[in-house]
Image (cartoon, grey):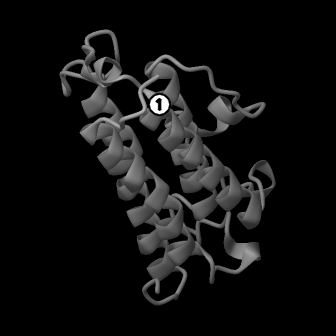
Amino acid sequence: MTTKVHALSAVISTQTRFMPTFAHMLCDDIDDSKFADRMNTTINHPAFVLGHISYYAGVCIEMLGASVVFDEGEAELYRGGVECSDDAKKYPDKDSCLEHFESRCNEAAAFIESCEPDVLERSAKDTPFAERFATLGQVASFMLMGHPSFHLGQISGWRRIAGMGSAT
C-alpha cells in the first residue's frame, strides 16, 4: 500500500466522495412516499437510481481487485438491464438509499486511494469496458464519476416530472 496517493487516485476519490453531496442536493426534499414512484412514466425513480449506482461502485471495486459485500438481492435489483420497478416495496426507504450510496462511495474512494499506481495503470482488456477504455483507472474514472453523474441527472429529470423545482 502506498502512502502517497497517485494523482489519478486523488481525482477519482475526491469526486467519488462528492457524489453523495450531489445526491443529497437532489433528494433531501423529496417526500419519502414518492422516492420509489415513477410518476406514471418509464423514468427511473430515485430509489432505483441510487441503488444502481451504489451497486456499480461496488462492481468497480471488485474489478480493481478488492472484495465487496453486496446486500442480498442487490445484483438482481440493480444490475444493468434490470428494469426499474413500479413496486415501491422492492426498494429501501429514502434514508437507507442515501446512506448506502454514501457508504459505498466512501468505500470506493478509500479503496482507490489505497491502490498502488500500477493497479490503475493495468489493462482493461478483460473487462466489459475493453473497447472503450485502455486502463482500469479509466474504467474507475467512468464508473465512479461519469456513470453516477449521468444517473443522478435522471433524478433531476424525475424532479421536474414530479412537479418539483431544481435542486438546491
Task: Decide if residue 23 is on the left or right side of residue 145.
Answer: right
Q: Amino acid at mark 1?
A: Ser
Residue sitting nearer the eye, 51 or 45: 51
Residue 145, compared with residue 93, is above or below; it is: above
Residue sitting nearer the eye, 133 or 13: 13
Residue 1, image x, y percentages? 47, 22
Task: Decide if residue 139 is on the left or right side of residue 31.
Answer: left
For image coordinates 46% across by 83% down, the residue present is 167
Which image quarter: residue 96? bottom right
Inspect this view and state whether residue 42 appears.
no
Inspect this view and state whether residue 129 appears.
yes
Task: Decide if residue 158 is on the left or right side of residue 106.
Answer: left
Which image quarter: residue 73? top right
For label 1, the residue is: 114
Residue 93, image x, y percentages? 77, 61
Which image quarter: residue 115? top left
Residue sitting nearer the eye, 16 or 160: 16
Residue 126, compared with residue 161, is above or below; it is: above
